[in-house]
Image (cartoon, rainbow, N blue to C red):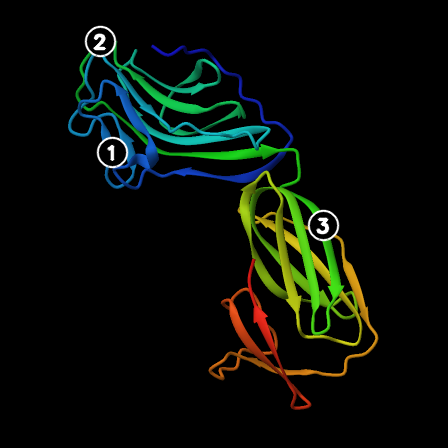
Amino acid sequence: MKKLILLLMLIPSLVLSQYPIINNFNTAALDGWTQSGQTFNAGWHSPQDICFNLTGNYLDNQFYYFDSPIMDHSLCDSIRVSFSVSMSLRAGDKLSFLFDNGGWFGVTIPSSGNFFLILPSTVTQYSFELNTNSNGNLNGRYCHIDYVNTQCYTSSLPVELSLFEVEEDSDCNHVKWSTESELNNDYFLLDVSYDGSSWKTLDNIKGVGNSSSVTYYHYDDYLLKEGYSYYRLTQVDYNGNSETYGIEVIYRSSIEKEVQGIYNLIGEYLGKEINNNHSDGIYIVVYTDGSTNKIIWEQL
């Protein structure tokens, strides 16, 4: 039997970031959760829950367990686990939420409802335990787990940016940046301004999500302007939280050619700029003076 103790739940004053562990139990695979102990008459209940009594009632004098997959929360400072329970138990029967933190600990769930706990990031597994060792009539008794979601508290920045700069190439402004690490990074927005106050988005560049190694990004801006061009980078988390980094500036003393349009090799017009919505390949830049230039576009 797994060890059960009372856990005091405290909410830390840290930054909450969406952690992509969502268990809605929409299929019989149960999002990787498995059964142990008594398994008869327990399992997945359509349309979406863990069920301790698939038909009729749960069994008497048993220990049921539903165990989560092994998890790694090492990128978090702590985690928030929320879950929903629907149940009608006999007096004396007990449903518990357990967690493995170098040993099994947990709390008793007192009733139906929505619950959450703040746990250390060293927790590696969860389990629901139903103890049916009391006495009495089992008619009409049931227990369901509707969902289990895990979020991440972190006091550190979601992305550690190590480089953000822009360089002048002959036919474009080459913007590049790199990250030392990423946590829940959904995407970057790259914006440009020609006066430092009015901005337009050049592209949405997909992030890698979670990483502890260096990741490199770049964007080539072919719509050149004389004078100053300002670039800013915004990082967006999976939950919509964002952070904007400092502005990089480049000055071009003269621009001899203005882009009329960009075309693919079969002559389709793609607009006046190319971005990560376009596939790798060769494109033709047509300028207003009638000249052309061939570019090779390759995403990272």
Residue 129 seen anywhere in this rendered image of the structure:
yes
Secondary structure of the residue carrying tag 1 is: strand
In percent of the image, x 51 and y 70: which residue is there?
A: 281
Q: Quadrant of the N terminus?
A: top left
| Residue for badge 3 | 163
Q: Earlier in the sequence, mark 1 or mark 3?
A: 1
Q: Nearer the viewer, mark 1 or mark 3?
A: 3
Vertical placement of residue 23 versus 198, above or below: above
Q: Nearer the viewer, mark 2 or mark 1?
A: 1
| Residue 56: image location, x then y, percent | 15, 26
Secondary structure of the residue carrying tag 2 is: loop
| Residue for badge 2 | 135
Name the residue type under label 1.
Answer: Trp
Choose top left, top right, bottom left or bottom right for residue 298. Answer: bottom right
- Mark 2 to mark 3: distance in Å? 66 Å
C-beta proximity under 8 Å, tags 2 and 3: no
Name the residue type under label 2.
Answer: Asn
> Which residue is farthest bottom?
290
10 Å neighbourhood of mark 2: few (<14), some, or many (≥20)? few
Vertical placement of residue 110 versus 177, above or below: above
| Residue 182: image location, x then y, percent | 60, 42
| Residue 173: image location, x then y, percent | 71, 68
Q: How many marks?
A: 3
| Residue for badge 1 | 44
